[in-house]
Amino acid sequence: MRLPLTLLALATSCCTTLAVDLKGRVQWNELCPSLGDLGQAKAILDDGRLHGGITRDGSFEIPDVSPGTYILNVVSHDYQFDKLRVDVFETESLPEIRPYIPGTPLSPPSSVTLPYPILLTPRVKNDYFIPRQSFNLMGMFQSPMMLMMLVMGGVMLAMPYILKTMDPDALQDFNKRQARIGALQSSLQSGDLSGGLSALMTSGQEESSASTGAAKQATPSSSVKQRGGKNRRR
Amino acid sequence: MHLLWLCTAVIWITQTWAIQASEVGVVDWHKPLVGVPLFGALTTAPRFQRVGNAGAKSRSLLFTASSGNILAAIDPADGEIAWRYVFEDNEHIIGYKHHGEVVAAVSGAGGATLRLLDAATGDLLAEKRLHKPEFGRLFDPATIGTTISFDAEGDIYVVSNAHIARRVDGKTGEVKWGWTAPDQSSLVAYSKIVTTPTTVYLIGLAKSFASYTIHVTALSTTTGELLTSGHIPSSISDGLTDFFELRDVKDASVPPRIVWIEGGSVRYFTLTPELKEKPMGFKGATYKNILDIGLSEYGQFIALREDGTARVLRSVPEGFRQIWEFAESANSPKYTASKYVGALDMDGRSYVARVYWSNVYKKAVVHVFAGHLAEGKGLVSGYTFPFETNVHGVLSHVTVEAANPEGNTIVARLALTTTTGAIQLWQHDRLQWAREEGLADMKVAELVELPERKITTSQVGDEEESFGDRLVRQLSDAQNFPQYAANFVRRFVTGSYASASSSAAPSANASEPLARDEFGFRKMIVAATAHGKLYGIDSANGAVLWSRVFGLGWAAEIGGQVIPVKMFVTRTVSDGDAPQVVLVTQRKASNGLMDTVLFHVDALTGEDARGVSASGDLLQGFDIIAGPIVEAYMLRNGPQKFVVLLDEFVQVHIYPDTAENKEAFRQLVPSIHIPLRTGAPGERRLTGHRISSEIEFTGKHVADIAWSLGFPAGEDVLSITPRSPHEPVASLGKVLGNRTTLYKYLNPNLMAIVTGSPTAVTPKCSLYLVDGAKGTILYHVALPSAEGACDVKVSLTENWLVYQYYDGDASGVQSTKSHRVASVELYEGFGIDQKTRSSDLSSFSNETTALAVFEQAFILPRGINVITTTSTSNGITIKDLVVASETHQIQSFPRRVLDPRRPMRKPTNQEMEEWLIQYDPIVYDDPKRVLSHNYQVVGTKHIVTSPALLESTSLIFAYGHDLFFTRIAPSNTFDVLSESFNKAQLVLTIAGLALAIIITKPMVRRKRLRERWYD
């Protein structure tokens, strides 16, 4: 009986020399001013086998941490904390604390080291709810869709008067374009996509040919003018 | 670009169904529980304590440690939880002690951790590790070897591991000194501590030949140095109950003492720092027992005489004095054995209460003795109270708080713990409140559909109805018409339809029979607890509608326990009649015999469906097998449903045992495959059984071994998760972006098996997918083991397997320590467009092994305890993952995020057509998807998902400790007009258009007319 007990005592002593009690503190901020807001929470290493409860003054202590690399996290119902990487060494030196981004490889470790004892800050308070969508007449008319509809309606109503006051040439042009778009729309509606595209293409060609035609028409006149100029010089 | 994709993914994920703040408590409910009090030891049992400074400002709280490993304080005024502190699963509460504004609690093996909590709020003040849990000495019961004591300054003296004493500062939690028993005396197990201003006495027991001897060690209070130590001549037979310490905090002239019972006499020893006193005997009568009633700090205890008569003894400077003898407290068949308990009032005066059940009056009786009343002669006040033993079982623990408002009146407040796990508070003979804490120990639960609301018709088609009769009938039918019309108009105008987020609870009219709501959100939760009670709970608000206490059958005389194993809904509403439930239980009698007992009840009322037990009485079961069961199933043959049980000898028992069911079973025999776990622990195998079509000479079918699947040496089968046999599958395949199809692998015999090799040199875990009909391994993966334990959570539905584990390997270059969830999808054939019709394939076809596996692992934000998927009535809605996480939350993760076919690069157009998003190893942790939002759902062990009538919605019920119920719509409520649907906008738009027509019509007409004239 005595031998196992002494062995046990020895084991305890040898383990206590290696293992470290990891100390840290939660910094209360305006997001989370006290333990009453945080609720029962604990700091855990890895999957929670080693843990320490967060006390009213924010401090925590994770006892008997053997050398190794750990991820420190805070298990809290309502708050999110940064995850930290903790390296505990076999030598007497203090544990090294580094920031850690979840999902990234552990090596190489981040070059930034944080001070020990660990300081944790509540980052985000969980918001579980989505706002209620309520009916609001002003809001309804402020929406871009509604505004567009209103503008369209206004244009529709005002159209006859605009057309009346328009220049007859521009009116002709406008009517042509309108007809082209109408044709495209009807072909699209009938599902004849290629037909609609070709109609667009041909209309485009027409337009280009029309413009070149206009250019052609323009050049003779200019030449005439030039000629006239020559004639005048003569 | 990558960031952009991530953003779109996040935006797309966040645009999903979430709860609105106004829906809290409407679509969900949460029942926080403290658990069944641990009344076995005085250190963990419920106690009334006054919190705060003595006097009028203090308030009383009912403290208790519970089976849910929770230390809780309940407000005795209304029965609400004032606070609760949840301990780790592997760290059991050993004891707690209250002093002023602090509660000290020790937990873990041998008292490994000491915590100081604020008594009023439950805030953690300090946490101190006393020793490593691995070095904790295990005692039975665990409460010995650890004890706490406070001194006047609020410092804590704690003995842990039965041989280490420490003085801990009551404010900072710092250890002031520690003392460890030297090796030679660690055979002494210290279990009590007495503090005086100068000396601390540790009292323990040393094992001698046939009994125990008391050993006392005196330490200095200030330095902790050893003053004296020695045995006290004594012989104690029961080290748990036969000795305790006594002192009187109110009278300093009474020295601290140890009292014990030895050979029929009460003996005591006065503690002095030198330990020079001699053990003394209390002369008078012979006693059978002494009871610590929680007044040892006030110098009072109970001594029981041979015939059971109880005497209250008090420690006085010169010895002991008998201050009272309870009349008629001797053992008698007229009443049950009495429970004695001490009580205090606001001013710290002590009372002793005796509570028993009278077999004559069929009521519970209380006698409260107040020693200070009647000019110090003592006075007893007694009354009865109507405890309902048919509903709550038997009293198992009592704690009392007394008050003496004036003269000789005594008002007592009793907190009872019953065998069914309820906590009740009785003020005098009135029940103030009751908490059904047995619900925290729920073992099985099923959600049962409710019938439709019956529309009362006044007349059924009667041929010979005269005109006058018909007129009268139709008029009487029509009398409700104005009301109906008014309702219709109001509904049409305001748009107040039943929506998917409205409450399912019935209106205040309670007289209406149970009926479901519009969308089938209201169901009956039938649940059985380990404390011998069956409950019917309304899923709309969590109210207990009926409850039944199990009868013990032949074991009633010797006592026993009913442990629920499985529950089957054998008749549903769609079968035409009131739904029925069969509960399969194992009854463990106190003499060690195990029987299998069935309870068959009407799910709506809790009435015995076999008609054996009366409605107000105990529910008697049906002893189907005289022995344990191996497995229980429910078989269906068309509308017929019956329960099949396999006993130890793999014989088949059918319930109900009718000729029809036997015939149906005979027809089903060829299609039944039963895989069972067999073999000794450590070398368990999976053995497939088939049932013989012939009936054996015993009159029963017997299962024979058909195949056996051995796993590698040392691998033990830890869990088996079969695919749910009757889940609806809406589509057999998945159409991809390129118009090809992946056909789902839907083998009905599929099962997931987790194995572990805890004894191996390098422990590892494995997960297998096995065809349960022939034992073929279809999929195998080796998983890392977390320090020898295999904590793998598995969910298997349709062709989708999800498992979660912790990967703690940090050795590799790319490795990262995290909780992982792996999503595996199985498809038929070896690629696209290959179809084997796996759902109807014969189990013996070679093609059952032809399957393609898509798998991908993800990183979960936190550890989880339970994993399951949603279920809907037709399986059309996407199945989301529902988990209970370590933060006491119920959270859902969208299926799309866990899609194993998510591409590793930017998705192509075809992939985008399938809504696939680029792979991201981290599962986005969205608080909007926390279904339990602000509720702390503690200790969830099971999550049941059940379909509602609406295809879009799945009902979720979490149990294990706290109860939580909610609904979830993974693909949004597509089959119901959304809550945000704007009826007003629609009506306004239509009205606006109508107005526009009215305005423009004359304008257009005038214009036309003008055109006719002037064109």
Image (cartoon, rainbow, N blue to C red):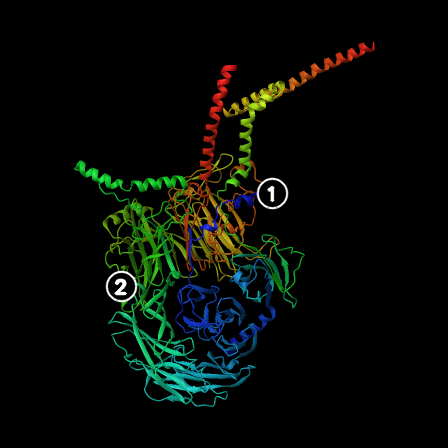
Which amino acid type is shown beneath numbered disc 1? Leu
Which amino acid type is shown beneath numbered disc 2? Gly
- Characterize the local packing of mark 2: few (<14), some (14-19) or many (20 or more) Cα atoms within 10 angstroms: some
Name the side, left or right, on which B887 lies relative to B306: right
Circle 1 residue? B4
Question: Subunit of mark 1?
Answer: B
The residue under the point 54% across, 70% down is B128
Circle 2 residue? B553
Residue B687: percent from left, percent from top: 38, 54
Residue B647 visible here: no
Q: In this rendering, do the residues under marks 2 and 1 share a single chain?
A: yes
Name the side, left or right, on which B264 lies relative to B107: left
Residue B387: percent from left, percent from top: 30, 67
User: Relative to residue B818, is residue B463 depicted above or below?
Assistant: above
Tag 1 or tag 2, which sits nearer the N-term? 1
- Characterize the local packing of mark 1: few (<14), some (14-19) or many (20 or more) Cα atoms within 10 angstroms: few
Q: Please state which of residues B456 and B843 is positioned toward the viewer in this rendering.
A: B456
Question: Subunit of mark 2?
Answer: B
User: Residue B3 appears in which quarter of the rendering?
Assistant: top right
Locate the N terminus of chain B and report the quarter of the image it occupies: top right
